[in-house]
Amino acid sequence: MGSTNTYNVIDYGATGDGKTDDSQAFLSAWQKTCSTPGASTLVIPSKGVFLLKKNIILKGPCQATNMNIQLEGRITVASQSAWVGDKSMIILITNVNGLTIDGSGGSIEGFGSSWWPCKKCPRPSVLSFNSCNGLSVSYLTIRNSPQAHITINGCVGATFSNIIIQSPSDSPNTDGIDISSSKNIWIKDSTIASGDDCIAIIGDSSYINATGIACGPGHGISIGSLGRNQGHDKVEQVYVYNCSFTQTTNGARIKTFQGGPGYAKNIIYEKITLTQAYNPIIINQNYTDLTSDGGVQVSGVTFRGFKGTSADDKAITLACGSQGCFNIVLDQISITSSLSGKPASCSCINAHGTATSTDPNCASLLK
């Protein structure tokens, strides 16, 4: 790192006083970092609170072949009333390859509490990646996003590790990490508490791994929703391993709209620990009240090595559409109900597959 060119946002006009808008200083420092050949690092220093009142778009491609962002300080987002930027995102990083973000010691505070009361109003996501390949993000903390905390779109080859995401259970649409149109994404060793999905894997995504994730509160680790507005969505090759769901509204979930074409296949949830989680295992192909025929084809889904407690008696729900779900595997499942006198249950509709060493018994699972 001795030959690395380092650019500190303070040197480009940032005050770090938590009152002055530092967004232009961030952009100026980024432009210098991005345009410098070789190894180049943008530094947000530890001494300071850096306020953003409008979006910052960190654009590539860059001349730097080794791009780094060192987040040592605290970034905070202006309240809804003080925000003057676009309301779709706060920080967008786009078309940057080979970027490394180290958030050790730093954090981003989204100040979502000022945005959440108006659920139908546009609300921005805190950190969005678009068309970034070879991305590495580690030790990053994001709290209280107005909407999703991290979105990943059109990226190939990205690793997110030791991420902390924190929002209250009643914060609307505050997904932890949303993945769309991306491939070879690995999220590992992270803690996510949110008011919506801890992780959502949506259309045209494949080879997605989530390992060592502690989820809760939140809506679980979800495939979907897929097929919205009859869109053709495809998700495949997903592996969720060694994760925990604590007091979540869902655990391992696949959710699709009626009538939408496409598929969700070759998906494995394995070695999952449950603590008073609602809907520990759920496939829901009736995500709305629409009555359209057909829908996303769900097949080749394995739920293996689940143990712990469900918040109520609904431990396993496989509610497939009229076209059916196929090659569903339930194996080594031990889920007990937290409700006294109400044993855990399994409900299957149009679901075809096998169940071995599974408690509760799934007699309604079709061959």
Image: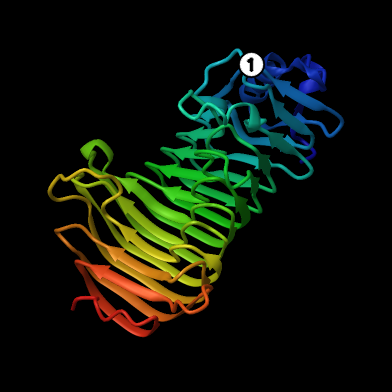
Where is the C terminus found, in terms of image quarters? bottom left
Image coordinates for residue 214, horizontal then vertical, percent: 60, 60
Residue farthest to the right?
A: 47
For image coordinates 70% across by 48% down, the residue present is 139
The 10 Å Cα crowd at callout 1, few under 14, some 14 to 19, many 20 or more, is few
For image coordinates 58% across by 54% down, the residue present is 217
Image coordinates for residue 92, horizontal then vertical, percent: 55, 27
For image coordinates 30% across by 46% down, the residue present is 226
Residue farthest to the bottom?
A: 357
In the picture, measured across the screen, residue 236 lies left or right of residue 77, that is left
For image coordinates 57% across by 29% down, the residue present is 117
Q: Depth check: give the residue in front, 73 or 326.
A: 326
The quarter holding residue 207 reads: bottom left
Is residue 277 at all visible to an observer of this figure? yes
Write down the residue under mark 1.
81
Which residue type does callout 1 highlight? Answer: Ser
The quarter holding residue 323 reads: bottom left
